[in-house]
Image: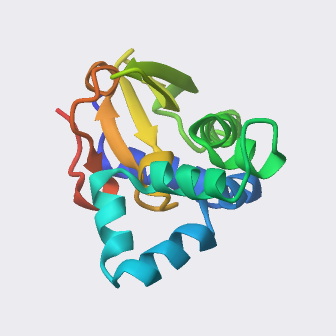
């Protein structure tokens, strides 16, 4: 039971309706302001290059926010992974995601940079990663097979995703 477009859509829906997820992922006025200053396509480029969260982190640090600041902690990858996997677990318990066995966060270190995202285990034990921090778009996370995400192999935005085989 590989991850299908429909199952990915249901996972995203569980996150999209959750208020804590909405607050952690969007709105991102800091990023919108930076994008507006650079050019109209900057937000699009950051979303598809999967750098949106990193740019927002840098912008928050330039504003003097760091680990320990509530807003910073909620909006970095750790905070986003925490609220998204909780929303997915809630949907599993409500019977809305029968294909999913469980969800949690997953951690990697690539080029010395620590990153956290949302890990999904399907009923057939296949594993996938949804990275909302990469795109900062509720309905367009970057999606990877877990083994690819761990080595920072290119992910695909949900809007382009057709499912894994």
Q: Quadrant of residue 13?
A: bottom right
Considering only vertical position in the picture, is 45 above or below 78?
A: below
Considering only vertical position in the picture, is 158 above or below 145?
A: below
Front-lying residue, 15 or 95: 15
Residue 12 in sight from this viewpoint: yes
Q: Answer left or right for 112 relative to 19.
A: left
Q: Which residue is outermost to the top?
A: 125
Considering only vertical position in the picture, is 95 above or below 145?
A: below
Q: Answer left or right for 103 relative to 91.
A: left
Picture coordinates of residue 125, whole percent (x, y):
39, 15
**Colour setup of the view:** rainbow
Q: Quadrant of the C terminus?
A: top left
Residue 28 in sight from this viewpoint: no
Residue under the point 49% across and 51% down: 53
Q: Which residue is outermost to the left?
A: 165
Picture coordinates of residue 20, whole percent (x, y):
75, 53
Picture coordinates of residue 61, whole percent (x, y):
64, 50
Front-lying residue, 28 or 103: 28
Q: Quadrant of residue 27?
A: bottom right
Residue under the point 81% across and 44% down: 69
Number of numbered labels in the structure image:
0
Residue under the point 35% across and 22% down: 110
Picture coordinates of residue 23, whole percent (x, y):
72, 60
Considering only vertical position in the picture, is 157 above or below 32?
A: above
Residue under the point 29% across and 66% down: 45
Q: Quadrant of the N terminus?
A: top left
């Amino acid at each position: 039971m590989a991850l299908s477009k429909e199952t990915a859509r249901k996972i995203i829906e569980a996150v999209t309706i959750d208020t804590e997820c909405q607050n952690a992922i969007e709105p991102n006025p800091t990023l919108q302001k930076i994008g507006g200053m650079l050019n109209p396509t900057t937000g699009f480029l950051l979303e598809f290059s999967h750098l949106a969260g990193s740019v927002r982190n840098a912008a928050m640090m330039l504003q003097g926010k760091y680990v320990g600041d509530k807003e910073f902690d909620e909006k970095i990858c750790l905070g986003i992974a925490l609220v998204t996997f909780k929303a997915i677990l809630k949907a599993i318990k409500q019977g809305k995601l029968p294909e999913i066995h469980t969800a949690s966060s997953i951690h990697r270190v690539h080029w010395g940079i620590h990153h956290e995202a949302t890990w999904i285990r399907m009923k057939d034990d296949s594993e996938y990663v949804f990275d909302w921090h990469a795109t900062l778009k509720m309905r367009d996370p970057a999606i990877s097979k877990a083994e690819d995400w761990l080595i920072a192999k290119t992910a695909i935005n949900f809007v382009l995703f057709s499912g894994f085989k």
